[in-house]
């Protein structure tokens, strides 16, 4: 009987976890799509890159979604079973708690093992691949032919080019070019122009014909008109290519292990903390989901969210402290798990313990 009830509880938790993770992934994808599309529109990403960047970004955020999704799933599933008195009836019939919750704890351990693979191996590789694709897409977008009637930002927004028409051979007609040199803005208009790229693929040159140039500081009288020109070449340096990914999130775990740098050690501690967080939240979610009589099935959801927020903020703060050298690397983030467990147990069992103490202290 205990095994049957244990499988029933596990099935309820797994079903709820799938639904919760689906909702969280939809919310995450909505934000990811908006951010990637905005970046793609600004940097003129080639087609086919957007979906790949969204997928890689989703892999990076799984390390955050899995623990909170499991916590909410356990609290929601067990809260419904407590609300419908199913768990209360099973425990009253003599079913051991280990038989009921053993499958849930096993699920937490399995998800923690998978999360360890994600945070230590998959997520850094996905970040490195995303950065490489993004850098290549930016440079490819800079090399793409200019479209008529659209503004093109070059050199990280330091230059803007506009052409009213584009001939079949690529010649630009009625061209507008704006460049920033600190507070000074340089505006050039020309009847036609052609684009070319230097052999080293680092600089894009725009040769303008039959135009005029203006220089000055916006909002002031310091504007002057330069003499008309028959031909003018404007070099625009392209963003440098990233041959090796140096972003800290993209560094492989062995490289973090071998480095004594506090920032790299802080990132390593964060990667290790995510699977541990999954196990700790699984253990806390079981007593956290226990409802009192006549309590609503969602009465403990807000408390679960508060526990996760405190936990996540403690880990983030500890990571920052390690990176700055405020706490020793040897201490790491292990203390955050102990603090969260003690705080959660105090919140869950504190009122009952205080009530028992008052009852014992009351005169007979």
Image (cartoon, helix red, strand yellow):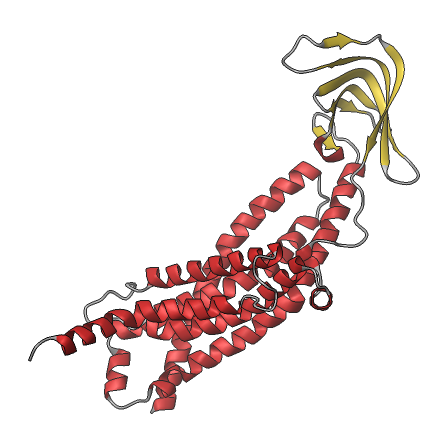
Instruction: Report the residue at 30% width, 63% height from top.
Output: 298
Q: Which of 336 and 159 is in front in this view?
A: 336
Query: How many labels, in total?
Result: 0
Location of residue 263 (image quadrant): bottom right
Check the picture and name the quadrant holding the C terminus.
Answer: bottom left
Instruction: Report the residue at 54% width, 66% height from top.
Output: 333
Query: Can residue 335 be seen at all in this image of the molecule?
Result: yes
Q: Position of residue 342 (x, y in %)?
A: 39, 70
Q: In the rendered view, does 243 fall on the left or right side of 62? A: right
Q: In the rendered view, does 79 fall on the left or right side of 35? A: left
Q: Residue 195, relative to residue 71: is it above or below?
A: above
Check the picture and name the quadrant holding the N terminus.
Answer: bottom left
Q: Residue 206, relative to residue 41: is it above or below?
A: above
Instruction: Report the residue at 72% width, 19% height from top.
Output: 185
Query: Can residue 18 be seen at all in this image of the molecule?
Result: no
Instruction: Report the residue at 49% width, 70% height from top.
Output: 278
Location of residue 181 (image quadrant): top right
Q: Which of 273 and 293 is in front in this view?
A: 273
Q: Position of residue 148 (x, y in %)?
A: 74, 26
Q: Position of residue 5 (x, y in %)?
A: 35, 85
Q: Residue 316, relative to residue 112: is it above or below?
A: above
Q: Position of residue 223 (x, y in %)?
A: 72, 10
Location of residue 130 (image quadrant): bottom right
Q: In the rendered view, does 360 fall on the left or right side of 205? A: left
């Amino acid at each position: 009987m205990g095994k049957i009830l244990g499988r029933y509880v596990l099935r309820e938790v797994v079903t709820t976890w799938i639904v919760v993770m689906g909702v969280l992934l939809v919310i995450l994808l909505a934000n990811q799509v908006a951010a990637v599309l905005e970046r793609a529109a600004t940097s003129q990403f080639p087609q086919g890159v957007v979906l790949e960047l969204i997928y890689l970004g989703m892999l990076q955020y799984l390390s955050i979604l899995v623990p909170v999704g499991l916590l909410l799933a356990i609290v929601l599933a067990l809260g419904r079973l407590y609300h419908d008195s199913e768990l209360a009836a099973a425990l009253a019939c003599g079913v051991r708690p280990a038989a009921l919750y053993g499958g849930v704890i096993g699920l937490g351990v399995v998800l923690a093992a998978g999360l360890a693979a994600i945070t230590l191996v998959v997520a850094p590789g996905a970040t490195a691949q995303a950065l490489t694709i993004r850098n290549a897409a930016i440079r490819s977008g800079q090399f793409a032919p200019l479209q008529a009637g659209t503004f093109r930002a070059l050199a990280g927004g330091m230059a803007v080019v506009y052409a009213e028409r584009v001939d079949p051979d690529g010649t630009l007609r009625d061209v507008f070019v704006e460049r920033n040199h600190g507070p000074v803005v340089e505006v050039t208009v020309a009847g036609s122009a052609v684009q070319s790229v230097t052999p080293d693929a680092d600089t894009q040159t725009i040769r303008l014909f039959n135009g005029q140039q203006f220089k000055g500081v916006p909002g002031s009288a310091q504007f002057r008109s330069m003499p008309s020109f028959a031909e003018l070449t404007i070099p625009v340096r392209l963003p440098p290519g990233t041959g090796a990914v140096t972003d800290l999130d993209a560094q492989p775990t062995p490289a973090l292990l071998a480095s004594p740098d506090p920032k790299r050690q802080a990132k390593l501690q964060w990667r290790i903390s995510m699977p541990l967080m999954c196990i700790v939240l699984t253990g806390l979610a079981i007593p956290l989901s226990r409802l009192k009589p006549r309590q609503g099935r969602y009465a403990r959801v807000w408390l679960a969210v508060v526990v996760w927020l405190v936990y996540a903020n403690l880990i983030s703060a500890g990571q920052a402290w390690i990176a700055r050298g405020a706490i020793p690397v040897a201490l790491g983030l292990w203390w955050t798990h102990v603090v969260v467990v003690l705080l959660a147990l105090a919140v869950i069992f504190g009122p009952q313990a205080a009530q028992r103490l008052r009852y014992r202290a009351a005169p007979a």
